[in-house]
Structure formats: structure tokens, C-alpha cells
Amino acid sequence: MIKGKKRGQLVVLSGPSGVGKGTVIQYVRQRRPELTFSISYTTRKPREGEVDHVHYHYVSVETFRQMIEEGAFLEYTRYQENYYGTAKADVEALREQGQDVLLDIEVEGGSNVRRLCPESTLIFLLPPSFEELEARLRGRKSESDEVIRGRLSRAREELQEVPNYDFLLVNDHVEQTGEEMLAILKAQECRVSARLDLLKEM
Ligand code: 5GP
């Protein structure tokens, strides 16, 4: 770790597919550039407009399985026929440099991160309603009806995990949600446990 610099925070953002996590993350990162987004590995094919090594590292199932065997993942999951995983080394290196790291992962990954890194901050993003979520998923025009139905039923299951999260936000307006998330990050930074170095200096 860089001398005199504290270890970076680990922040998890979860929420149903289509809730708008990407847009909120973009808003927050524009205002807090020191928050680094951890790019996950996935076996899903890129959607239109998605770029390799920007949105995800797109890999084959063979490569993903090999990475599992090598213990390369902090956490991983299988979500609707595809694998998704967070690379351990990437997150560790960034946090050691004192950078805050943001993970956009689903709830199983969220609870695994909580178990492995109890000091992490878990934020869950809700849609204003299920009707609105369905409209957003359909508006994306990238998935079949079957995939959309699967994602909606998974969204209802994911709600069961919300009590394990620290913060719950409703993504009605991106600016408001983004500001709330920035406030959470600021508050976490001011926790006594995150500022013991200041006390020691005194
Ligand atoms: P999508 O296919 O819509 O990009 O992502 C599907 C779901 O996988 C989303 O809920 C997203 O948050 C989650 N996800 C993306 N990367 C990871 C990851 O590395 N680990 C886990 N557990 N979930 C992920």
C-alpha cells in the first residue's frame, strides 16, 4: 500500500437487470473519478454498443472455467446461462493503492463479497415499480421475450436478499439517485473505523 494512504473502500451496487445501475454508476463516477469501476469477466456475448475491456472482459466458457480453477475470482456466479465474475487480483491491487472500487454485481455475488470483505458497503437499487422495470427491459430491445421474463422473475427473487444490504435506493431520477449514492460514499469515508489513522496521528 502507498505509505500514508488508507486501503480503498469496496462498494457493491446490486439491483435487478434494467434498473439503471450503469447510468447511476456513470453519474457517480463523473463526480467522483477516484472511484474505480471493476470490470467483470463474463461469458455473455456483448450487447450492441458494449465494448470489450470497457463494459466487461468477454471470455469463452473454457477461459472462465480455467480462471475458476486457478482461483482467480473474488466471487463469481452463473446468471441465466452465463457466467459473471470479479477478478480478485484487480480489486486487491486497486484497493492496496488506496483506490475505492465499485462492483456492479447481482445479489449472490453481493453476499459472497460481504462474507469475504465484511467492511464492504452494499447498496441495492430498486426500480420505481415492476411495470417500469419491464418497460425499461423491453425498451432496451436487446433481449428476447423469454430472457426478459427470466430477468423479471429473477428480479423478484433478488428482492429477498435486500435485508442483507446496507442501503436501499429507488432509481426514479438518475440525478437524485446518483446524489444519494455520493452521499453514502462520503458518509462511509467519514466512519470512525475508516479514520483510525487520523486518530493515531492526533
Ligand atoms: P448483464 O447481463 O445485464 O450485464 O448483467 C446481468 C447481471 O449480472 C447484473 O445483475 C449484473 O449486476 C451482474 N453481474 C455483472 N458482473 C458480475 C460479476 O462479476 N459477478 C456477479 N456476481 N454478478 C455480476
Image: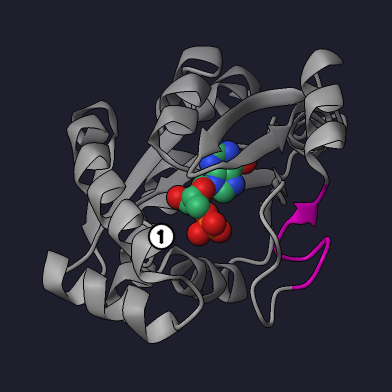
Q: Please, what is the dominant secondary structure of the magenta stretch? A: loop
Q: Is residue 50 left or right of residue 123?
A: right
Q: Is residue 180 visible?
A: yes
User: Which residue is denoted by mark 1 in the rendering?
Assistant: 147
**Percent x, y of residue 55:** 70, 64
Above or below for 7 versus 28: above
x 55%, y 31%: residue:
77
x 49%, y 31%: residue:
109
**Percent x, y of residue 132:** 18, 76
Above or below for 75 versus 15: above
The C terminus sits in image quarter = top right
**Residue 165 sits inside the magenta stretch:** no
Q: Quadrant of residue 103?
A: top right
Q: Which residues are magenta?
A: 51-59
x 83%, y 60%: residue:
53
Residue type at tag 1: Val
Q: Is residue 177 left or right of residue 194?
A: left
- Does mark 1's beta carbon lie closer than 8 Å to ligand 1? no
x 64%, y 44%: residue:
101
**Percent x, y of residue 49:** 69, 82
Q: Quadrant of residue 147?
A: bottom left
Depth check: give the residue in front, 5 or 16. 16
Q: Is residue 103 visible?
A: no
Where disc 1 sits, the SS reads helix
Q: Quadrant of residue 99?
A: top right
The N terminus sits in image quarter = top right
Depth check: give the residue in front, 34 or 198. 34
